[in-house]
Image: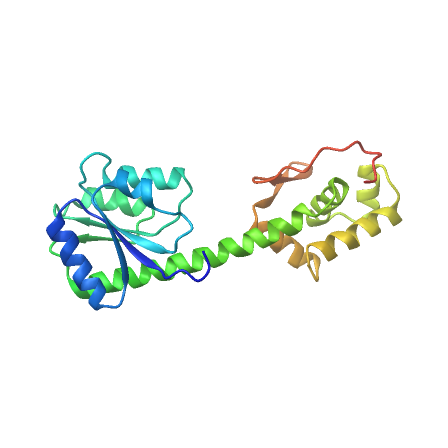
């Protein structure tokens, strides 16, 4: 949430390691919270809280990699820095493929730790800004009527007003009115900007042989009859 201090969430079952990490990070000026298991973290943490995870790979119960997978399933985007005493290259590769920021081997070098945490917190901040932008664009899109959404999909495909009118079974002047409303509600100054806004929220243009279609991966426009001019 806005105004919250970014926090380093430490998920580590060893009290000694947790204590050492808290001391090091606190001296470095970071806010810290600790958890002794993945299950405890899942029960207590608020996904809206900014920060990153220092996550032990070997945990009792749910493992570090399993927690990483569960957070992805829950759409919780905290950047993760894995900690391990094994130095297992294969494990590190799998963690990085899952989106981990770094993979640090115990005993942990303080310089590497601070660098990894700084990188993770920067990534989290950027992700949250991008998420806020997507939310704002989606709210604009949701103000469009079903017919305006139909016109928008046609516009970002590059269709002319007369082509849109023919496809929707309406007049060209009506299309112009809907098009102007789309540009106003979406706060787009040009068709190029409208296409960019659509792309930011997952409205992808998917050309097909002899035709084009627009895929909405987060919100599907309501189907309307060709003669409706909502």
Q: Is residue 98 visible?
A: no
> Residue at the location (32% across, 40% down)?
43
Residue that extends furthest to the bottom in the rendered view of this protein: 28
Left of 123 or right of it: where is 89? left
Q: Residue 8 sits in which quadrant?
A: bottom left
> Residue at the location (22% across, 63% down)?
25
Q: Is residue 97 visible?
A: yes
Q: Quadrant of the N terminus?
A: bottom left
Residue 98 on image: x %, y %: 32, 44
* Residue 210 vertical placement versus 184 (above, below): above
> Residue at the location (66% across, 52% down)?
140
> Residue at the location (85% across, 34% down)?
227
Q: Quadrant of the C terminus?
A: top right
Residue 40 on image: x %, y %: 27, 41
Residue 118 on image: x %, y %: 30, 63
Q: Nearer the viewer, residue 175 or 29?
A: 29
Left of 217 or right of it: where is 63? left
* Residue 62 vertical placement versus 128 (above, below): above
């Amino acid at each position: 949430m806005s105004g919250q201090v970014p926090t380093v969430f430490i998920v580590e079952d060893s009290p000694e390691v947790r204590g050492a990490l808290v001391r090091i990070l606190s001296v470095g000026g970071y806010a810290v919270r600790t958890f002794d298991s993945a299950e405890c973290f899942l029960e207590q943490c608020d996904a809206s809280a900014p920060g990153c995870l220092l996550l032990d790979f070997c945990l009792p119960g749910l493992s570090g990699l399993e927690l990483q997978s569960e957070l992805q399933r829950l759409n919780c985007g905290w950047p993760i820095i894995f900690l391990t005493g094994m130095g297992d290259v294969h494990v590190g590769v799998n963690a990085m493929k899952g989106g981990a920021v770094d993979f640090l081997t115990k005993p942990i070098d303080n310089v590497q730790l601070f660098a990894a945490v700084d990188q993770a917190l920067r990534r989290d901040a950027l992700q949250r800004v991008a998420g806020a932008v997507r939310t704002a664009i989606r709210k604009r899109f949701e103000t469009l009527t079903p017919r305006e959404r139909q016109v928008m999909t046609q516009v970002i495909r590059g269709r002319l007003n007369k082509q849109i009118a023919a496809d929707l079974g309406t007049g060209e002047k009506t299309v112009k009115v809907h098009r102007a409303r789309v540009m106003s509600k979406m706060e787009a100054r040009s068709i190029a900007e409208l296409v960019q806004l659509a792309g930011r929220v997952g409205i992808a243009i998917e050309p097909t042989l002899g035709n084009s279609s627009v895929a909405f991966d987060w919100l599907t426009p309501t189907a309307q009859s060709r003669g409706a001019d909502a």
